[in-house]
Image (spheres, coloured by chain):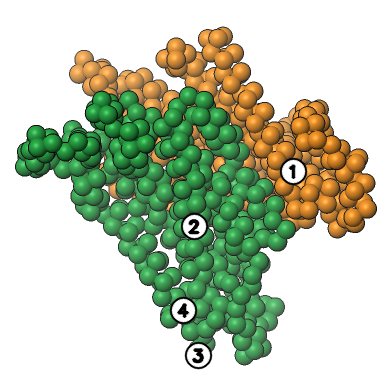
Amino acid sequence: MLRFIVRRLIQVVPTLLLLSVLLFAWLRSLPGGPAAALLGDKATPEKIAELNTVLGLDQPIPLQYLRFLGRAITGDFGNSLITGERVTTEIARALPATIELSIAALLIAVLLGIPLGYVAARYRGRPLDTATVIGTLVGVAVPVFFLGYLLKQWFAVDLGWFPPSGRQAVDIDATHVTGFAVLDGLITREFDASWDALIHLVLPAIALATIPLAVIVRITRASVLDVMGSDFVRTANSKGLAPSTVRERHVLRNALLPVSTTIGLQTGLLLAGAVLTEKVFVWGGLGTLLAQAIERRDYPRLQAVVLLGALVYVLVNLLVDLSYAIIDPRVRVR
Amino acid sequence: MTTPRGSLRPRPSTLLKRKKTRIDDLGGRSLTADALVRLRRNPVAIVGAVIIGLFVLISIFAPLIAPHDAGAVFPELQRTLRPDSIPGSMPGFPLGSDQNGRDFFSRLILASRQTLIVGVLATLIGLVFGVVIGALAGAFGGWVDTVLMRVTDVLLSIPSLLLAISIAALAARPSQTTVIIAVALVNVPIFARLLRGAMLAQRDSDHVLAATSLGVKRSAIVVRHMLPNALGPVIVQATLTLATSILDAAALSFLGLGDGDPARAEWGLMLANAQAYLDVRPALAFYPAVAIILVALGFTLLGEAMREAIDPKGRR
């Protein structure tokens, strides 16, 4: 087990190194070179030359790469062109909002998706199953940002059930401890703040959850069908086990293995979807940072956010792999 | 199991030939033919194919169907624009005006072309590069495989939309070309991984062993024996990728990284621009959105049906 963990950890290193090379190449290919991109509108030939010396861009490429790597490891990605603040500080401030939104969306997707996929598989070919499958196909085809606007228009503007944007009402006096609005309210016993944050969370979380939900439903359904047709389930049935025991102990437990991998893969979708959802609901998390960075071509910020997205994705999948090894002993041997 | 096509072809001797006709006489069907038969019986595939067929027809004949130019601004429409109302259908303009006084119907029809171009090109470019990389990796193995697959893995480790965003943002001025390149690059590693896996499975298979022992050249084995048999899953993936490419392009438009040319109509951009008028005239957002959803759905349905059809588990 330990050997598996160590081997899997070592595998991450070349991935990260290559990622840094790609990122470095990306920086080099910025329009007008990195210096011009950093200066933005204020770029003049003299200033570019000056910054080139400061940044060490007049030195050999391998040396430049090593310096870049050194800065990246220490978490120095420069300052945002929009606010002038260090990019890492900005990200640290925005991160809890995105994590909160992603967790809410993932909860919806998992808590709804697994039962729905299971039920669809059990009643395979019946109207319920057909409706579920069609629903998942349509769910994947709807642009996330359009769904966000629809939800906002119907449930916030027309019906007024939920707030249309933001994380918390402006007039709420909330103490900030962790940056997670719902959690903060619970810690400080300001339950009205928690509740307010929660209802702000509903619409964006639903919009963000649709695609992961559709994927989880389909994987669960396929996986349950697969296990139901396997030999050991037939054996379990034929030796007279109660159907409920077979369903819970044999089918569901084995069917959930591929589902756990899928949930890990969803983090990538969630991060990408968050960019779109946050823009619709003015959420103020990483997605909002990124959307601004795109509009204003704020490359240091853009670079840091994309890198963070990749890092989170790699790490979450590492965790999923490791948990997989705990659930399924067969994985460790390979 | 029927042997994959072409496996007995390299040295045509009478003996092999006779054997082959005998197998054919038995009425065995190749994997492809079998898959096509199952595809034709599947209503899901038919619905998907009909949607795609209509979409392609509309985009081909778009200039004939659309009464006006996509970029043409009509003063008579512009005059009727108010901050709180955008006129609907009126004579000469079946669906009325868009937010800038252009013919909404013509733009909607003509946009199908841009969407088709972006989707098909992004998929095709991704497919070609991915297939070449995957084929090289799968055919050679060893360090070529290791290097190519490491790079592929890294590209796959960046969430696809973020990758597309960072590539599209490199362009000083976003255009249709940058959108296509950005989406295509996202697709490359997906195809590369897929084809490599399929090629690896082929490499150890009996018909490749047979060809090798018959003395067929390695390049011929790769191109004639391995590649055709590995392409099935790739074609399925390409169909599904057409849907995601169209959706990704729409997302890029929404984030302001889409085609900046106002004379061209594109559903993603129309949808993104119409969000501000959801209160005034929801149809401006609804029609392009429904069009995107339908087309994406069409490709997904067909792709899923194809995936089912080529799955050997489904052979009875």
Q: Nearer the viewer, mark 3 or mark 4?
A: 4
Relative to A111, say whether A234 is above or below: above
Residue topped by disc 4:
B63
**Which chain contains the residue that carries disc 1?**
A
Per the image, label 3 sits on a secondary structure element best described as loop
Q: Amino acid at mark 2?
A: Leu
Pointers 3 and 2 in contact (C-beta within 8 Å):
no
Residue topped by disc 3:
B91
The colour of chain A is orange
Disc tally is 4
Per the image, label 1 sits on a secondary structure element best described as helix
For marks 3 and 4, give the CA distance.
19 Å
Q: Residue at x 33, y 38 (%)?
A: B220
Q: Amino acid at mark 3?
A: Pro
Q: Position of residue B143 (x, y in %)?
A: 52, 25
Quadrant holding the C terminus of chain A? top left
Nearer to me, A194 or A128: A128
Q: Nearer the viewer, mark 1 or mark 4?
A: 1
Relative to A258, say whether A194 is above or below: below
Q: Earlier in the sequence, mark 4 or mark 2?
A: 4
Q: Residue at x 37, y 46 (%)?
A: B236
